[in-house]
Structures are given as structure tokens and as C-alpha cells.
Image (cartoon, rainbow, N blue to C red):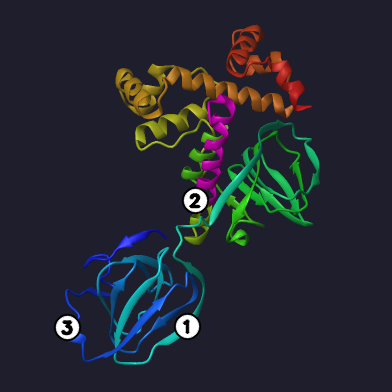
């Protein structure tokens, strides 16, 4: 709730600015001289009123038709329409003001705490404890824990079964969940596929914790970008990375609350590589790549599927996705290799043959280049 200037545009739904109080001198005049800095009540009048600042600096709080509170700097006389709910508080000083009225003042209590102090955040992440991106096999089974701080989990691949204080939840790929302080939570794979997920633990003040706890939520594209930023900041370890992660967690919390309040529903969630772009040709190209990743994919073949020239497709793909088609195919193929390793049904040699690598040695070289470990080391990590 930031401070607004009173003018004919910003204040038009509540009243208007008046240049002089002379026309209202016959109305009942009440002079207020007070130093009350906080209030949980609003006023209204059944007939019009005029407020005139006399000395000091004042803040005018007004309730909107949708029950939100707006805060204005009261530095000029204002005319307020009948039944508009408002109150006046001093801004870090003594305040005198006069109200011109023709009906009694009616006081209504409110759940909002109104104060002349600056904005106090509704969501304030104070402490960051851990940021862990984990990859587990399909036998993953965490017996559970509880702690006096918040925990956030996002499932990037696979499906996770959670129990929170004894209640079961299923977290599908692309879904996330917030565990409130002191909630006992159990996590395990569904037993069908490997599991990759991000866990962040943090502490802070959240005004409406009930809005985010005890529910699974799909990550829309805005949430996806924030989550990827958190992962990237943790991996890069740049100066003030932890500070940036705290900022991103705050953004994520606000975005999730807004999505919940607007009943926003996400039906298709992109994976780390299957990006969403604003071009139908490239969206179709990406779908074709993912559907045929175990086959040999060449630029001329892709261009033919889309009825485009190879040079135009190559240029457009780089512009929209940010990497070349060959690099994108390489990364998608390696992600598929990781999935197959996690399934535990194939040897490295079999995966190399299925995915079209010229040899297991070349597969290992490509894998290490991207993930800084060999396929066997990755399989060992999942055990």
C-alpha cells in the first residue's frame, strides 16, 4: 500500500479536490488535533464531507469498493462522497485538520491495521537455509521430518507422493508445494519413474500462510522462470546469490498467491528444455524434436516436416529459443539418457544404441561435458 498523491484522477472514485472551503462554511465544522499513529477503524458519513488540512502532514486512508485500502498524502482540501469509508492519521508528526459535515460520523472497525509508518511487507523472507536440486531413482523414499521453518518443493520430473501431517498428496511433474513450519511431511517416488525436484528451506513472515500451505499448485510460466532463476543462482554462486534467491522466493510466493486468488489453472507445464515460445513454427518444431528424439534428426528433415527452408528454420529457432537446433537436440537427447539411466532397465551400452550414439564412449564424453560426471557416476548418485 504505497502512498499516492491526491489529484482529480487518482481520487475520482472517492471524491474530488476542492480549491476552497468557502462554499462549506455553513456546514458543521470539527477541528481535530491529535497524534494517534495507528487505527483499526474507518469512518463514513451519510452525506458529503470536506476534509481540510490545517497543520502538519496527514495520511488519508480510503476503502475501495472491493475492500482494498488506498493511502493518500493529504496536502489539500478534498470533497468525499457519501458512505465512502476513510480515516485520517498523522504522518510522523502532530496533525491538525478540519472536517466539514452535515451528518454524524459513523465508525466501523476493520481487520486492517492502519498506520502512518511506511509500507510493511505482507511477505518478508528473512532467512535462507538450503537450496537443493535432487535427482533420485524410482525407489526414493524419505521417511519424513518437521522443522520450525518453511520448505518449498518443486517436482521437475516424475511424480512424488507426499504425506503432510498424515494427509496424502500427489505431486505431479510441474507441481509445487509449500510445507508450513512444524508440519511433518513424508516424500517418496511413485515407484514408476525417477524423480527430480528442487527443495528450498527458508524462514520469514507470511501474512496469509493458509493460502499456500496444504495444497499442490502447478507452476505456470512465470513460476517456472523464477524457479529456474533460483537454480541458476545457486549453481553460479555469484556475489549476493543468496540475496537474489531470497528475492526470487518472495516473487514466487506472491505469484503463487495471485494465481490461487485468480483461480489460475495451468494444464501444460514445460520441462526444463521444452520451452514455450511465441511462434507456432518453433513450437511445432520443438514438439517434433521431443517426439523423435530416439531417431536421427537433421535440419533438412525438420525443415521438411514444417514446410520451411532449412536456413529460415535455423535462424528463427536460434532467435526464439536462444540456442541452435543441433545444441537443443543434443541437450534433449542427454535429458532422455538421464531418464533411461534412472529407470534402471538398461545398460549404458543399450542406452547408447537406443539413442543413436556411435559408441558408449562417445555417450560418456557428451554426458560428462554437460553434467560434469559420467553416466555410471550419475547412476551411482541415484542409488
CA gap, disc 1 to disc 3? 30 Å
- Tell me: 22 left or right of 43: left
**Towards the viewer: 258 or 181:** 181
Locate residue 89, reporting x and y percent: 41, 71
Q: Which image quadrant is residue 380 in?
A: top right
**Towards the viewer: 311 or 124:** 124
Quadrant location, the C terminus: top right
User: Is 198 located above or below residue 26 in the figure?
Assistant: above
User: Is 332 located above or below residue 68 in the figure?
Assistant: above
Label 1 neighbourhood size at 10 Å, few (<14), some (14-19), many (20+)? Answer: few
| Residue 56 visible in this rendered orientation of the protein | yes
Q: Are marks 1 and 3 in contact (CB under 8 Å)?
A: no
CA gap, disc 1 to disc 2? 32 Å
- Tell me: 191 left or right of 199: right
Task: From the image, tell me which residue sits under label 3.
Answer: 22
Q: Secondary structure at mark 1?
A: strand
Task: From the image, tell me which residue sits under label 1.
Answer: 108
- Tell me: 216 left or right of 229: right
Task: From the image, tell me which residue sits under label 2.
Answer: 255
Bounds of the magenta span?
Answer: 232-253
**Towards the viewer: 356 or 85:** 85
Q: Earlier in the sequence, mark 1 or mark 3?
A: 3
Q: Are marks 3 and 2 in contact (CB under 8 Å)?
A: no
| Residue 85 visible in this rendered orientation of the protein | no
Q: Earlier in the sequence, mark 1 or mark 2?
A: 1
Label 2 neighbourhood size at 10 Å, few (<14), some (14-19), many (20+)? Answer: some
Q: Main secondary structure of the magenta part?
A: helix
Mark 3 vs mark 2: give the one in front. 3
Locate residue 320, reporting x and y percent: 36, 29
Amino acid at each position: 500500500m504505497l502512498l499516492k498523491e491526491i489529484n482529480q484522477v487518482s481520487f475520482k472514485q472517492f471524491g474530488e479536490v476542492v480549491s476552497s472551503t468557502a462554499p462549506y462554511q455553513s456546514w458543521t465544522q470539527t477541528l481535530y488535533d491529535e497524534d494517534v499513529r495507528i487505527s483499526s477503524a474507518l469512518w463514513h458519513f451519510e452525506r458529503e464531507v470536506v476534509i481540510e488540512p490545517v497543520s502538519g502532514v496527514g495520511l488519508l486512508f480510503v476503502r475501495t469498493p472491493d475492500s482494498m485500502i488506498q493511502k493518500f498524502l493529504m496536502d489539500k482540501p478534498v470533497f468525499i462522497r457519501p458512505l465512502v469509508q476513510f480515516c485520517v492519521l498523522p504522518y510522523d508528526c502532530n496533525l491538525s485538520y478540519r472536517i466539514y459535515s452535515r451528518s454524524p460520523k459513523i465508525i466501523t472497525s476493520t481487520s486492517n491495521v492502519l498506520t502512518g509508518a511506511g509500507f510493511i511487507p505482507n511477505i518478508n523472507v528473512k532467512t535462507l537455509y538450503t537450496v537443493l536440486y535432487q535427482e533420485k531413482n524410482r525407489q526414493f523414499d524419505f521417511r519424513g521430518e518437521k522443522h520450525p521453518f518453511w520448505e518449498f518443493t518443486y517436482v521437475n520430473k516424475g511424480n512424488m507422493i507426499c504425506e503432510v501431517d498424515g494427509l496424502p498428496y500427489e505431486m505431479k511433474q510441474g507441481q509445487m508445494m509449500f510445507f508450513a513450519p512444524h508440519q511433518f511431511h513424508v516424500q517418496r517416488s511413485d515407484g514408476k519413474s525417477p524423480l527430480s525436484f528442487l527443495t528450498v528451506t527458508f524462514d520469514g513472515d507470511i501474512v496469509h500462510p493458509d493460502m499456500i500451505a496444504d495444497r499442490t499448485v502447478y507452476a505456470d510460466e512465470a513460476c517456472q522462470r523464477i524457479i529456474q532463476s533460483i537454480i541458476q543462482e545457486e549453481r553460479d554462486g555469484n556475489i549476493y546469490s543468496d540475496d537474489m534467491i531470497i528475492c526470487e522466493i518472495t516473487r514466487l510466493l506472491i505469484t503463487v498467491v495471485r494465481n490461487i486468488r485468480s483461480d489460475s489453472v495451468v494444464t501444460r507445464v514445460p520441462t526444463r528444455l521444452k520451452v514455450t515460445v511465441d511462434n507456432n513454427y518453433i513450437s511445432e518444431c520443438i514438439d517434433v524434436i521431443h517426439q523423435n528424439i530416439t531417431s536421427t534428426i537433421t535440419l533438412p528433415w525438420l525443415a521438411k516436416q514444417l514446410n520451411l527452408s532449412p536456413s529460415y528454420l535455423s535462424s528463427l529457432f536460434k532467435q526464439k529459443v536462444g540456442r541452435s537446433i543441433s545444441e537443443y537436440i543434443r541437450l534433449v537427447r542427454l535429458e532422455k539418457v538421464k531418464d533411461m539411466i534412472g529407470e534402471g532397465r538398461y545398460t549404458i551400452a543399450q542406452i547408447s544404441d537406443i539413442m543413436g550414439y556411435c559408441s558408449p564412449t562417445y555417450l560418456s564424453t557428451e554426458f560428462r561435458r554437460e553434467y560434469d560426471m559420467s553416466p555410471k557416476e550419475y547412476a551411482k548418485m541415484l542409488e
